[in-house]
Amino acid sequence: MFGLNWDLIWRNREEFLWGLVLGLQMALIGLAIGCVIGLLVAFARTSRHRWLSAPAAAYVEFVRNLPLLLILFFLYFGVPMWANSALPRDVADLLILDGENTVIAGLAIYGGAYLAEIFRAGILSVGRAFVEAGRSLGLSGVQIARYVTLPIMFRTVLPSLGNTFISLFKDTSLAMAIAVPELTFVTRKFVTDTFQFIQAWTVAAVLYIVTAYAIAAVLRFLERRIRWAV
């Protein structure tokens, strides 16, 4: 008769927890880089110059219509093949990434496209009166963006930014496809070795759910602390 052996899960708990931590690290770093990409693209999209707004819009539309898994495969398998055949060795080595850095790059590129739209909406939501007030003080365009637009925008987009982080954290499960030892990969390996399907995937699901709720709780706390009526 089939029995549920939870003792095996407990003995391998460190592997599950390290897989969870690795996923969080990749999501956090990917989000940070994605924020930089998103901000640059968002300001480019709101620019009056066509040579800035058109490429930014193309990047957003192109990336948002690609599956993240396809981006990971392209970065992990496609880029090294192209770099080794078309570029000098020292340049090619800079473009060839290991599994973890591939996932971080993929999350940054993928998340950056979504964050660009979030930031663009935040920029457009900043009242014109604030911008005019900055100009009246003699601030340059860059100074207005830094001291006026960005602080107000971040307060506006914080809920969406938190949701994007949670989404990227869950998307790290796709790293299993390129053998990065995050939580889903660790769980699948454990199942392959022990055939404890129900226990392993139940534990993985609980870890994902608890972590996502914990992230959401922290972000809601931060939202309440910095709430500011514009």
Image (cartoon, helix red, strand yellow):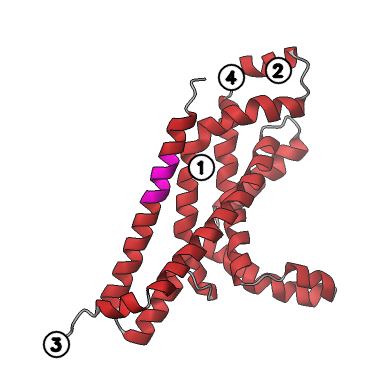
State the CA–CA distance, disc 1 to disc 4.
20 Å
Is residue 56 found inside the magenta-colored segment of the image?
no
- Label 4 neighbourhood size at 10 Å, few (<14), some (14-19), many (20+)? few
List the residue tagged with mark 2: 134
Residue 227 visible in the current orientation: yes
Where does residue 6 sit, x and y in percent of width and height?
26, 76
> Which residue is depicted at the point 35% across and 67% down?
204
Residue 61 visible in the current orientation: no
State the CA–CA distance, disc 3 to disc 4.
67 Å
Over which residues does the magenta segment extend? Answer: 213-220
Point out the residue furthest to the top here.
Answer: 136
List the residue tagged with mark 3: 1
Q: Are marks 3 and 4 in contact (CB under 8 Å)?
A: no
Badge 4 marks a residue whose secondary structure is loop
Badge 1 marks a residue whose secondary structure is helix
> Is 28 in front, or is 172?
28
- Specify the label residue 127 is tagged with: 4
- Label 1 neighbourhood size at 10 Å, few (<14), some (14-19), many (20+)? some
> Which residue is depicted at the point 65% across and 49% down?
59
Whether residue 67 is situated above or below residue 215 in the rendered picture: below
Sequence-wise, the earlier of marks 2 and 3 is 3
- Specify the label residue 173 is tagged with: none
Instruction: Name the residue type under label 4.
Output: Gly
Badge 2 marks a residue whose secondary structure is helix
Where does residue 53 sit, x and y in percent of width and height?
70, 38
Point out the residue furthest to the left here.
Answer: 1
State the CA–CA distance, disc 1 to disc 2.
26 Å
Instruction: Name the residue type under label 1.
Output: Leu
Circle nearer the viewer, 1 or 4: 1
- Specify the label residue 161 is tagged with: 1
Q: Are marks 2 and 3 in contact (CB under 8 Å)?
A: no
Sequence-wise, the earlier of marks 1 and 2 is 2
